[in-house]
Image (cartoon, rainbow, N blue to C red):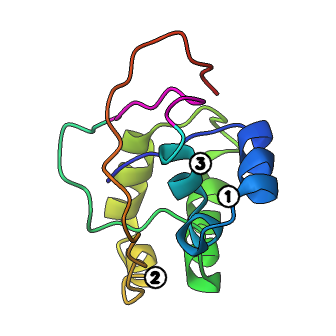
Amino acid sequence: MDTEVFSYKVLDEAYNEAVEKNEREHVTSFIRNHPERYLLANVTYKENQSKHRWTVDTIEDFISLKRIIDNLYPENPQFTCEDALKLLKKFPQWALINQHIEQKKIESVSPCEYIYSNRRFY
């Protein structure tokens, strides 16, 4: 499982400035292709949880995540990954909703790596 976090401002920049096909398809490609503008960092989790698909590319993704959020957010708006994993242990059928979806591959984008400098961080 990996994490991609960026502000609306960066999303808007990518939307308005991306011209390459892969940058238009995957917004993070634009961000990764411009390390002079953005500070990039990997966030890793202690266990491989790649069996889960926590993204919103399809209606199935939305339904799956909506169930998690609807159950956790009202009691704890700052719920964690561990909270979501515990919930999925309780309701394993929710993980099956989008399990059949194959993640699109990102073409010609190098892996995100730590870049320390005086660049803006969003």
The residue tagged 1 is: 70
Residue 36 included in the magenta stretch of the image = yes
The kind of secondary structure element at disc 3 is helix
Closer-to-camera residue (112/68): 112
The residue tagged 3 is: 72
Which residue reaches farthest top? 118
Q: Position of residue 67 (x, y in %)?
A: 60, 67
In the picture, the quarter occupied by the N terminus is bottom left
Query: Which residue is drawn at the image coordinates 31% and 61% (left, top)?
Result: 89
Of marks 2 and 1, the one in the foreground: 2
Residue 34 included in the magenta stretch of the image = no
Magenta segment, prevailing SS (helix, strand or loop): loop
Query: Which residue is drawn at the image coordinates 79% and 38% (left, top)?
Result: 9
Q: Quadrant of residue 50?
A: bottom left
The kind of secondary structure element at disc 2 is loop
- Three-letter amino acid code at the position of disc 2: Asn
Q: Position of residue 62 (x, y in %)?
A: 63, 73
Q: Position of residue 45 (x, y in %)?
A: 27, 39
Q: Position of residue 32 (x, y in %)?
A: 48, 45
Q: Is residue 111 above or below residue 104?
A: above
Q: Magenta residues?
A: 35-43
| Marks 2 and 1, how far apart at CA | 17 Å
The residue tagged 2 is: 98
Q: Is residue 54 above or below residue 95?
A: above
